Image: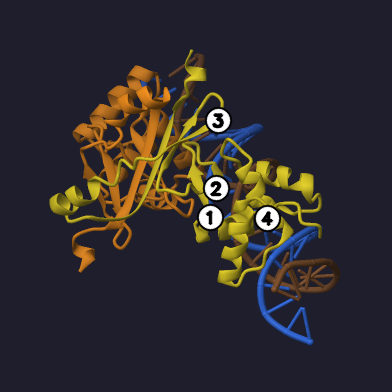
Chain colours: A orange, B yellow, C blue, D brown
Amino acid sequence: MKEKFSCSHEQNAKKLFRNEGLKSTPQRMAVIHVLHSSEKYLSINEILDSVKEFLPKTGLATIYRTLEMFVELGLVTRVHFPDGCHSYTISPKDHSHQMVCTKCDTVINFPDCPIEGLNETLMKQKGFKINNHFVQLFGECEDCRI
Amino acid sequence: MKEKFSCSHEQNAKKLFRNEGLKSTPQRMAVIHVLHSSEKYLSINEILDSVKEFLPKTGLATIYRTLEMFVELGLVTRVHFPDGCHSYTISPKDHSHQMVCTKCDTVINFPDCPIEGLNETLMKQKGFKINNHFVQLFGECEDCRI
DNA sequence: ATATTTGCAAAGGATTTGCACACAC
DNA sequence: GTGTGTGCAAATCCTTTGCAAATAT
């Protein structure tokens, strides 16, 4: 198949696949590409629809399998919305978190991790070691706040 | 039906129901009771099983309806685990967050909100107003860390 | 007495799985 | 060539809904 995606993200993903012994398929590259081109978190079906613009025969199961693999690899971040729905975005390079505007769905990154400072305090106070944290902020962005 | 639950939590819930024009049923009281007696987050099915010890004929749909109502009322907090499962716990009185030990499932409260300090900063830097936040910490508690 | 709530069963959605074929390496 | 990945359809799982009977006020 003709190769359509070749930005640095796609190249990095290819390297990662090679290192992990995974194959670099058009479907996988298309998912990377679609997530990268979006300003907002995308649902499974939105991802499928966008991927189908390039690869019309793509099946839903492939998207599920691909995204699960990408989350596992740390390539993609899954968000849990309050109502229980899931959406996906490319994981930010630095350790940052995302805010989602509930009016326009735009995602805004912010580079500070509010949890980082807690680690030591919690260890001392409660003997609890944080291995994994999950922060999600919902609100209104500048444009929608008027 | 004979009334089995009468701690302060149950009394508070009853008052809340009355104020909201909702009925205080044995099933609802049992859910409150079960969540209150647990050290850990409970899944829908765990809640159903525990409620059935008191009320064997309880149906799954009732648990779903009850929990949704309780989350709406702010009586109960829903957690989204990384794998997408949901669990429930009684909402803490103060604004606090919870840590879950991934070994023993125990929930530990901590009263500081790491997000609170962010509000002003984010507003200034990005013009973003946080309306809703969702923090979940996973790790290992003192006993399991050995 | 009456409006709400419940239990049951069926419907609806989302996600996963099995398998033959296609494809990347 | 070989083993992994894909597409399709069926299966499974989770959650919601409709409705008659039960029940809290």
**Observer-nearest of D13 and A45:** D13
Q: Tag 1: residue type?
A: Leu
Mark 2 vs 1, N-terminal side: 1
Q: Tag 2: residue type?
A: Ile
Q: Is residue A28 left or right of residue B8?
A: left
Residue visible at 63% across and 57% down in the picture:
B11
Q: Nearer the viewer, mark 2 or mark 3?
A: 2
Give me the disc on residue B75.
Answer: 1
Is residue B9 in view from this perspective? yes
* Residue A79, x across and y down, in percent: 39, 44
Mark 3 vs 4, N-terminal side: 4
Q: Tag 4: residue type?
A: Met
Q: Are marks 4 and 1 on the same chain?
A: yes
* Residue B107, x across and y down, in percent: 51, 34
Residue visible at 53% across and 55% down in the picture:
B75
Write down the chain letter for disc 2. B
CB contact under 8 Å: marks 2 and 1: yes
Write down the chain letter for disc 1. B
Task: Quickly name the residue at label 2.
Answer: B90
Mark 2 vs 3, N-terminal side: 2
Q: Residue furthest left?
A: B125
Give me the disc on residue B105.
Answer: 3
Label 4 – label 2 distance at C-alpha = 13 Å
Using a 10 Å C-alpha cutoff, classify the residue at mark 1 as few (fewer than 14 neighbours), some (14 to 19) or many (20 or more).
Answer: some
CB contact under 8 Å: marks 3 and 4: no
Is residue A26 in view from this perspective? no
Q: Tag 3: residue type?
A: Asp
